[in-house]
Image: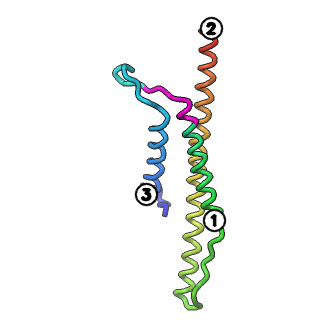
Amino acid sequence: MADDGGGSTDEADLGHAAVTWARSRLAAPVEGGGRAGGFVVDPERAEACIAELTRITNELRMQVVTSNGFRFDAPGNDEVSLNLAANGAEMSRRAEGFLQAWAAQIEATRDALQDQLDAYRSVETSNSGLLA
């Protein structure tokens, strides 16, 4: 479960892994790019990454829809059983919130990537017009 204190959590590590995954699929190193090195963005790779981020977001949203049907009925009327049902419902609610937030972050990343790709293509079109 997510750490409400904002500290590093397994989920945060997974988010970092998703960003690292996306970076590895968007740009390729270019030799001779200077001392600092260089990268070139491949629009087709960026499009594939955008499609994959959309797929991941859709899958997360489906998990939220699926989790809405979870019910936690107490197996009995004793205090422990009632507490078990209350805790199960609360855990489900928190997981739903986490999935919604995670999907929103991935969507924001996807949208930012799409904006960058659109800007890249616009510059490419402008530059090709200058060379013609």
Magenta span = 39-47
Q: Nearer the viewer, residue 84 or 38?
A: 38
Element type where label 1 sits in the image = helix
**Which residue does the numbered mark 2 point to in the structure image?**
132
Could you give the CA–CA distance between mark 3 and mark 2, rounded to whole angstroms? Answer: 52 Å
Determine whether 92 is above or below 84 in the image.
above
| Amino acid type, label 3 | Asp
Query: How far across and how far down the image is residue 110, in percent?
Result: 59, 41
Q: Of callouts 3 and 1, which one flags the residue occurring earlier in the amino acid sequence?
A: 3
Asked where in the image residue 99 lies, by quadrant, the reply is: bottom right
**Which residue does the numbered mark 3 point to in the structure image?**
10
Residue depicted at x 47% and y 26%: 40
Image disc number at residue 66: 1
Q: Decide whether residue 108 is among the magenta residues.
A: no
Q: Which circle, 3 or 1, is nearer the viewer? A: 1
Element type where label 2 sits in the image = loop
Residue found at the very far top of the displayed protein: 132
Residue depicted at x 53% and y 81%: 84
Residue depicted at x 49% and y 34%: 26
Q: Decide whether residue 42 is among the magenta residues.
A: yes
Q: Nearer the viewer, residue 118 or 51?
A: 51
Element type where label 3 sits in the image = helix
Asked where in the image residue 7 lies, by quadrant, the reply is: bottom left
Classify residue 19 as left or right of residue 71. left
Query: How far across and how far down the image is residue 21, in percent?
Result: 46, 43
Scheme by which the image is coloured? rainbow
Could you give the CA–CA distance between mark 1 and mark 2, rounded to whole angstroms? Answer: 54 Å
Could you give the CA–CA distance between mark 3 and mark 1, rounded to whole angstroms? Answer: 22 Å
| Amino acid type, label 1 | Thr
